[in-house]
Image (cartoon, helix red, strand yellow):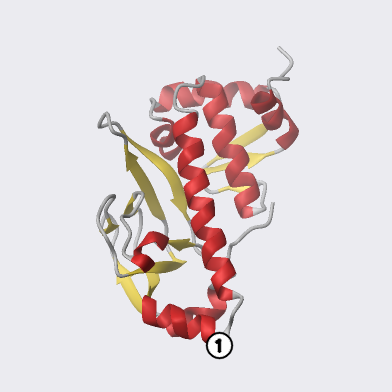
Amino acid sequence: MDSLRYLWKPFVSYGQERRLKKNEILFQQGERGKGFYYLKDGKINLTFVSSQGAERIVDFLFPGFLTGEPGLREDPFFTTAILEEDSILYFFSEESFRNICKDHPEAANIYMSSLIQKIRLLNETISIIHRPLEYQMAHFIHKLYYKFEDSIIPISQTSLARYIGTSRISVYKVLKDWIKEECIEISHRTIKVHDINKIKSILNGTKQL
């Protein structure tokens, strides 16, 4: 799986730097923007509210990725973006995007790939809401493992519980089983994956009981 991380970094000089504080809202689900963003430093939670009114985290944005892509065409945002920590972003308007594409034609493909990835992510998240807890956790860990191309995933048990929409205790019970199986280890706000194939076996329904 090809990672889009840092592919937009060469174009930050075309954008406008913005510094936001923890808990600030970058954009809200349903509102229309005037452009999109690149996260240079910090962390963002992306939340989604279903038609039934249930809210849950659908993704965590770390430095090197785009967010708010629908805003380029003034389409409604899919999610709400909330700063989990003080962050530095770059804002790109439609005009700045045109200038980038004029000088660097490959930028259009990076933008479109990022937009498509976000749409797929949201659809996948919605589709597994009613799957067993362990499956949902495996799906998310598997996604982050390849997203960051690293076995060490910077996520806390509390954040993972918010993504699943369950309690931290329930999440810990599953993680504890995975630790016994030597699949992962956990430390302060990180999960280290030792055996991604065991995570895959949960998703494929081939896990040995």
The structure residue drawn at horizontal position 58% and vertical position 38%, both measured from the top left corner, is 141
Please rate how many residues cluster around mark 1, counting C-alpha atoms within 10 Å: few if below 14, some from 14 to 19, many from 20.
few
| Residue 192 in sight | yes
Q: Does residue 62 appear to the left or right of 55 in the view shown? A: right
Please state which of residues 179 and 116 is positioned toward the viewer in this rendering: 116
| Residue at 52% in and 28% down | 136
**Coordinates of residue 156 in the picture (x, y in percent):** 47, 41
In the rendered view, would you say 12 is above or below 122? below
Up the image or down, 34 lies above or below 13; here it is above
Tell me where residue 83 appears, x and y as whole percent: 33, 56
Residue at left 29%, top 50%?
29
Q: Is residue 147 left or right of residue 30?
A: right
- Circle 1 sits on which residue? 103
Relative height, residue 128 to residue 13 (above, below) = above
Residue 11 location in percent, x, y? 52, 80
Q: Nearer the viewer, residue 53 or 56?
A: 53
Q: Quadrant of residue 94?
A: bottom left
Disc 1 residue type?
A: Asp
Total tally of numbered discs in the picture = 1
SS for callout 1: helix
* Location of residue 174 in the rendering, given as x and y in whole percent from the top left corner: 55, 22
Q: Name the foreground residue: 32 vs 57.
A: 32
Seen from the viewer's position, the closer of residues 127 and 54 is 127
Picture quarter with the C terminus: top right
Q: Is residue 155 visible?
A: no
Residue drawn at point x = 44 percent, y = 27 percent: 129
